[in-house]
Image (cartoon, grey):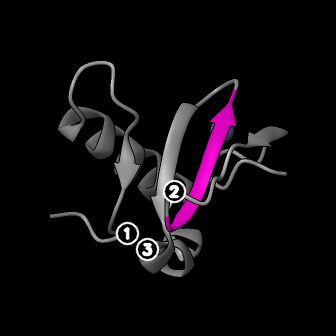
Amino acid sequence: MQCPICGAEAEDLSSGDFDGLIVGCKRCGHYAVADGALNDFLRLDFDARVAALNDAKAAADSGAKPVIATAVRV
Ligand SMILES: [Zn+2]
């Protein structure tokens, strides 16, 4: 699959346990995008997608996978 943030080749790590996309990207790391946020997320420009990932990383507990639950910055 392509990384939905940077477009590089990435691993699709999605599992039945999570309602959305789980991505393993060499550039962006491991992260998840919730199903409900995915369409809006893909419409963001590159800088906004990176910012959304950074927000999710900041909100995640240490060691936990960041989850992009909303494509709108709060
Ligand atoms: Zn990436």
Residue type (three-letter) at the residue carrying disc 1: Ala
Q: Name the residue located 78 percent from the left edge and 39 percent from the top edge.
A: 10
First along the sequence among labels 1 and 3: 3
- Left or right of 72, for residue 11: right
Highlighted magenta segment, given as a residue range: 19-25
Quarter holding residue 60: top left
Asked if marks 1 and 3 touch (Cβ < 8 Å), the reply is: yes
Quadrant that contains the C terminus: bottom left
User: Residue 21 appears in which quarter of the rendering?
Assistant: bottom right
Residue 5 at what x, y percent from top left?
61, 50
In the image, residue 41 lies at what x, y percent? 50, 69
Residue 41 numbered mark, or none: none
* Mark number displayed over residue 71: 1
Quick one: label 2, few (<14), some, or many (20+) residues within 10 Å?
Answer: few
Residue at horizontal 59%, vertical 49%? 22
Instruction: Tell me if residue 20 is in the magenta stretch.
Output: yes
Q: Secondary structure at mark 2?
A: loop
Q: Nearer the viewer, mark 1 or mark 3?
A: 3
Q: Which residue is mark 2?
A: 17
Q: Main secondary structure of the magenta part?
A: strand
Mark 2 lies within 8 Å of ligand 1 (Cβ measured): no
Spatial CA distance of label 1 from label 3 is 5 Å
Which residue is located at x 67 percent, y 44 percent? 6
Q: Secondary structure at mark 3?
A: helix
In the displayed structure, 29 sits above or below 44; it is above
Q: CA distance from mark 2 to mark 3?
A: 17 Å
In the rendered view, does 38 fall on the left or right side of 10? left
Front: mark 1 or 2: 2
**Residue bearing the label numbered 3:** 37
Q: Amino acid at mark 3?
A: Ala
The quadrant where ligand 1 appears is top right
**Residue visible at 60% across and 60% down in the picture:** 16
